Image (cartoon, helix red, strand yellow):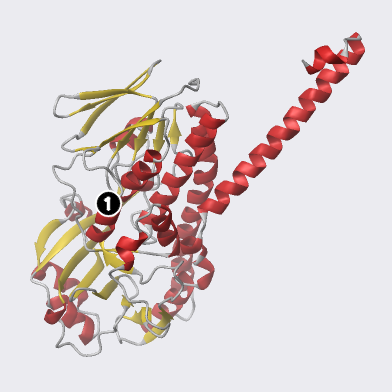
Amino acid sequence: MTIAPKKQIKIAIIGAGPGGLAAAINFLRIPFVELSVFDQATELREVGAGISINENTWRHLQLLGAAQEIEQYSNRGDGNKIDGEHRNGRTGELLSRRFQSVNPDAPPRSRIQRYKLQRALLSRVPEDLIQLSKKLEKIEETAEGVTVAFTDGTKAGTFDLLIGADGIRSVVRQYAFPDHKLSYTGKVAYRTIIPASKVAHIKEIPPASTFWHTAKTHVYTDPLDEGLFEIATRASESEEHGKKVSWGQKVSKEQVIRHYDGYCETVRQIIAAPDEWLEFAMFGGPRLESVIHHDRIALLGDASHPLSGAFGSGAAFAFEDAHVLARAIQYAHNHNRSVGEALKLYDEIRSPHYKSLYSVLNEFADNAKEIEAISPPLEEDDMIAESTRRNWKTSNDWIYKYDVTKVWDESVKELETQQSFQDLTLEASQRKVAVEADVPQALVSA
């Protein structure tokens, strides 16, 4: 199905999380786009704790005009300030360390509270743009476009493009790819932010974002700004338990601390400090071969790559999606191409990137098997060190440094080169036909 280009393009975004907001900001800058944004929440608030700000996240915050909102919360220092560490969770031994960047084109620090990121993005969006309490129930496609229906009985449309930015449990993905299934990973995340005063008595807490690793799980700690302290963990739970967990449900400290008896004293004291936690069951799914459907629908962010938070960079991936999708729509419109052609260009750029990310996940799984197969078996501390060395190696830094703006520019350059070649080939073919038919050259040129 191909949609002919027209002066105004009606676009609907389902979901107003980081990815949906980034898409909205990008499309608001395109004059021929008529934009609608819907979210199922009754109010826009972030559920969770902190969110990672990597180099690619920062690049897009700058492009979106929201970086300054984040910069104000951090002091870059002189380059000697520790930004992140990896430690053995059993012994506390330091395995690796990095320092905070003083480069203004790099993030001031690696972690901020999620609401601050959302607030920074919302500052770039008109207050009345996002329609709340709109839980998507049904999608209908006709020759005219896409119509959406919500559980409150209302409908909206017809739209030339529907963007699914509705998270890992995306209703848009379920419609577009009904055979794609999510599954429980066997892990839950426990997260909380508490006053730093509650852990001030604990000795040897690193003054930086820190991963405390064991052979099967990890604990993450980070002293945030404004006198706060973040704790985020992973733990194994049964499938029966995982399927009962609602996203961000409150649980008691007793449910959490039982998982971390094998950690060092510092971590055990940190885990015991909060009185209440939020629990998140971790779901994931196989890679989608394509993130577009019927020249009408595009997936973005967690909806397009159900990676279950594997790289801690979901916001950056969503920002990259939003940038490419908006550029593709603009490029297609400027060259009198259809929305469907724009989506194909978007898919050609983004799907290979997700394939590369899933390849890294496969590498993690292979690493685990190889380490377990070492003979004689490694002692647990040696296993932790080897696993950390393999999975957090610098060769995977490309994930966080990836510059999709350059990829976009290179793709357009290649596309235009191909088009120029096709034009020259067509012109040569016309000349040949004209010569053979003895047609005056003036008529060929005309």
As rendered, which of 75 and 328 lies closer to the eye?
A: 75
- Identify the residue at horizontal 39%, vertical 52% (top origin): 64
- The percent position of residue 144, horizontal first and vertical second, equals 38, 16
**Picture layout, residue 17 above or below residue 162:** below
- The percent position of residue 4, horizontal first and vertical second, equals 50, 20
* Left or right: 52 in relation to 3: left
* Left or right: 272 in relation to 345: left
- Identify the residue at horizontal 16%, vertical 52% (top origin): 245
- The percent position of residue 309, horizontal first and vertical second, equals 34, 57
As rendered, which of 85 and 272 lies closer to the eye?
A: 85
* Residue named by callout 1: 123
Label 1: few (<14), some (14–19) or many (≥20) C-alpha neighbours in 10 Å: few
Q: Quadrant of the C terminus?
A: top right
Q: Amino acid at mark 1?
A: Ser
- Identify the residue at horizontal 34%, vertical 38% (top origin): 164
- Identify the residue at horizontal 91%, vertical 15% (top origin): 435
Rendering quarter of residue 299: top left
